[in-house]
Amino acid sequence: MNRPVVVGVDGSPASLAAAQEAARAASARNLPLRLLHGYLHPLGYGVPLTPYDLGLPAPTDAGQQMLERAVNELADRWPGLHIEAAQVAGGPGAALVEESQRAELVVVGSRGLGGFGGLLLGSVSAQVVAHARCPVLVVRPSEGTEPGRGPVLAGVDGSESAALAVRYAADEALRRGVELVLVHAEAGRHAEEAGGGRVAPEEQPSTLLAGAVATARDGRPDLAVTGRTVRAGSAEQALIEASQGAALIVVGTRGRGEFVGTLLGSVSQALVHHAHCPVLVAHDYRRAD
């Protein structure tokens, strides 16, 4: 069964940019594309106002027209791509999280309709990034640069989550035919300890990067991989700066030292809010029964 690439669409510029990137991802994977519009606001907009109006409201004509326009635009640019669209009676975040159980990838815009201008990540995007059951790609509208140019980046810190991110990043770089750059960020005290030789041998940047490079090249002999150590005030700052000029940065959900109960680590949260390129959050696949 070909699990689709799923993208949330609400007519906003961010969601339409996400739909274009989702079409590229679906085409590269030879998978169908599914556009999803959750037409009930998370706070209850569209729910019957009185107890006598039973049942959920029907899909709206405006929503259907918006989806049809999006499908037509994508079909013109990506001929041969199988595209389907649906309106779902539910909050858009909850609808996309539910859909993620049957998806290969979920793509969201950084901010949809109704988002406050000062917010870097909308509430729907944040909900999906935290709770999805498959990888999530967060896309922002292009700011004068052609999307897809530059290398694919992945952060390396020796954690299982980062190792998963490296594998996803390697596959993505191979699909795009670009270089994979693995970045290990040394920040603050950790950078000083690494320079003074007080870090355990298996945690030395050279050792961590060598292991990550081997992981990336496993089964991908034609992939160009570069390992790089950068120093900055924080790992977040280092990776945000490294994302300039990249086509994509891939991060795990949690790094080393993060609390096990957290849904998204501090570095991952910083990147989905502030990176200069699209961000792929490397959730493991947790399928619906």
Image: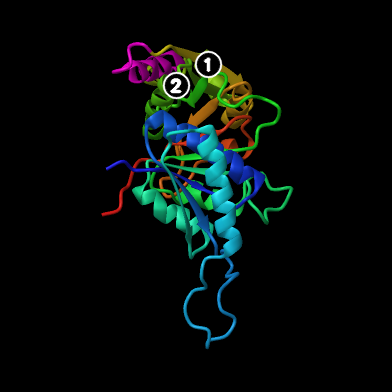
Residue 219 on the magenta span: yes
Q: Which residues are magenta?
A: 204-222
Tell me if residue 16 comes above or below residue 97 in the rendering. Answer: above
Relative image position of residue 83 (x, y in whole percent): 44, 43
Q: Quadrant of the C terminus?
A: bottom left
Label 1: which residue?
229
- Rate crowding at label 2 as few (under 14), some (14 to 19) or many (20 or more) other CA atoms within 10 Å: many
State whether residue 269 appears in this view: no
Instruction: Say what amino acid the circle numbered 2 marks.
Output: Ala
Callout 2 touching callout 1 (CB < 8 Å): no
Figure check: 98 above or below 244: below
Q: What residue is at 52 percent from the left and 88 percent from the top?
A: 52
**Is 105 in front, or is 275?**
105
Q: Residue, x 59% and y 45% (percent of image)? A: 15
In which quarter of the view is residue 247 placed?
Answer: top right
As helix, strand or loop, the secondary structure at mark 2 comes to: helix
Secondary structure found at label 1: strand
Residue carrying label 2: 173
Type of residue at label 1? Answer: Thr
Residue 146 can be seen in this image: yes
Q: Is residue 108 magenta?
A: no
Earlier residue among tags 2 and 1: 2
Of 228 and 76, the residue lying toward us: 76
